[in-house]
Amino acid sequence: MAEIIDGKRISQQIKDELKEKAAALKAKGKTGALAVIQVGADPASCVYVRNKKNACAYIGIESLAYELPEETTEEKLLELIAELNGRQEVKGILVQLPLPQHICEDKIIQAISPDKDVDGFHPQSVGAMTIGAPGFLPCTPAGIIQLLKRSGVEIAGKHCVIIGRSNIVGKPMALLMLRENATVTVAHSKTRNLAKLCRQADILIVAIGKPQFIGAEYIKEGAVVIDVGIHRNENNKLCGDVKFEEAKQAASAITPVPGGVGPMTIAMLMSNCVQSIEEG
Ligand code: NAD
C-alpha cells in the first residue's frame, strides 16, 4: 500500500518558511506587491484567484486585485500590464488563465516584464529554465520537484515518464526532471502502447487532463505516482487523472487529489514572489 504524499502539509511547510523570509526581507526594507489580474468571472478562476490572494495575506505580501469585466479589450489589458511593469512596488504580475477568446494569451504573457513573471510563462523565463540560467520556474512543475524532494524520493538516475506535453505542465516538468538527473520520457496523445511505457516508470507524472484515466495497469509495482489532474466527478467531488484507489495498491507513494499537487502550485507562486522581492 502506497505512502500518501501530503501536498497540503508540504505546501504549509514551504509557506511558513516563506513567511519568515518575507518578514526578514521586510525588516531590511524590502517589500513588494503581487498584482493579480482576472478577466471575467469563470468560477474556477475565481477560486484560484481567491486562494492566491489568501496565500499572499498569509505570507505577508501585499496583493493588488484587478477584476476586469469579460468584455475587456486586449488593448486595455496590455495597457494595465504596461502600467504595472513600470510600478516599482509591483514585484509580480499574474494574469489568471484562461482568458476570454478575444484576447491572445501569448501576447499577454509576452507583455509581462520577465523580472515580474512570477508564473514563469514568459518565453525568456522558459529559455532560462531550458539552459539552467536564473529565472522564475513555472509553479506546478517546480512544486512537484519540491514534493518529491521533501518526501525523500530520490530522482537522480530514475526513469521518469511524464504523460502530457503542455507548455505549463508536461514540457517544463520534463526539463526540471532532467535537471534533477532523471532519465525522462514524455508521452502524449500520439504515444503508442502508453500502458507498457508507463509500466517502465520509476516515477510516473500524470498531466493528461482526463478524469481517472490511469489505472493499475499503467503502474509498475513500487513506482511513485504524481497526479496533476484536477476535475470534478459526477458527484461534484474533486478527482485527478489517476484512479487513486487502485493506483495506491501498486505504487510505493502517490499524491491524492485534492491535497497533492494543487496546494504546491500556490506555494511555489509565493516562492517566486518572495524571490522577486529579494532580487528587486
Ligand atoms: P492539456 O490539456 O494542455 O494537456 C494534456 C496533455 O495530455 C496533452 O499534451 C496531450 O498530448 C496529452 N494527452 C491527452 N490525451 C492523451 C492520451 N489519451 N494519451 C496520452 N496523452 C494524452 O492539460 P494541462 O494544462 O497540461 O493540464 C493537465 C491536467 O492538470 C488538467 O487536468 C489540469 O486541470 C491539471 N492542472 C493542475 C494544476 C495544479 O495546480 N494541480 C496546474 C495545471 C494543470
Image: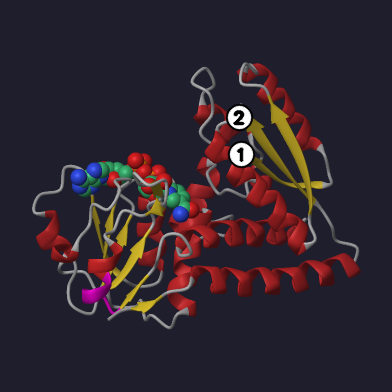
- Where does label 1 land, which residue? 46
**For the C terminus, which image quadrant?**
bottom right
Does 269 sit left or right of 241 as displayed? right
Numbered circle sitting on residue 93 = none
Q: Residue at x 58, y 60 (%)?
A: 268
- Look at the numbered disc 1 and give the secondary structure of its residue: helix
Quarter of the image where one finds residue 253:
bottom left
Crowdedness of circle 2 by 10 Å Cα count: few (<14), some, many (20+)?
few
Within 10 angstroms of label 1, few (less than 14), some, or many (20 or more) residues?
some
- In the rendered structure, are the residues bearing label 2 and label 1 in contact, judged by CB atoms less than 8 Å apart? yes
Is residue 251 rendered magenta in the image?
yes
What is the magenta range?
248-252
Element type where label 2 sits in the image: loop
Q: Position of residue 101 (x, y in %)?
A: 49, 20
Kind of residue indicated by mark 2: Ala
Which of the 4 quarters of the picture holds residue 67? top right
Label disc, if present, on residue 41 of the rendered structure: 2
Q: Position of residue 118 (x, y in %)?
A: 63, 50
Q: Quadrant of the N terminus?
A: bottom left
Seen in the image, is 189 located left or right of residue 228?
A: left
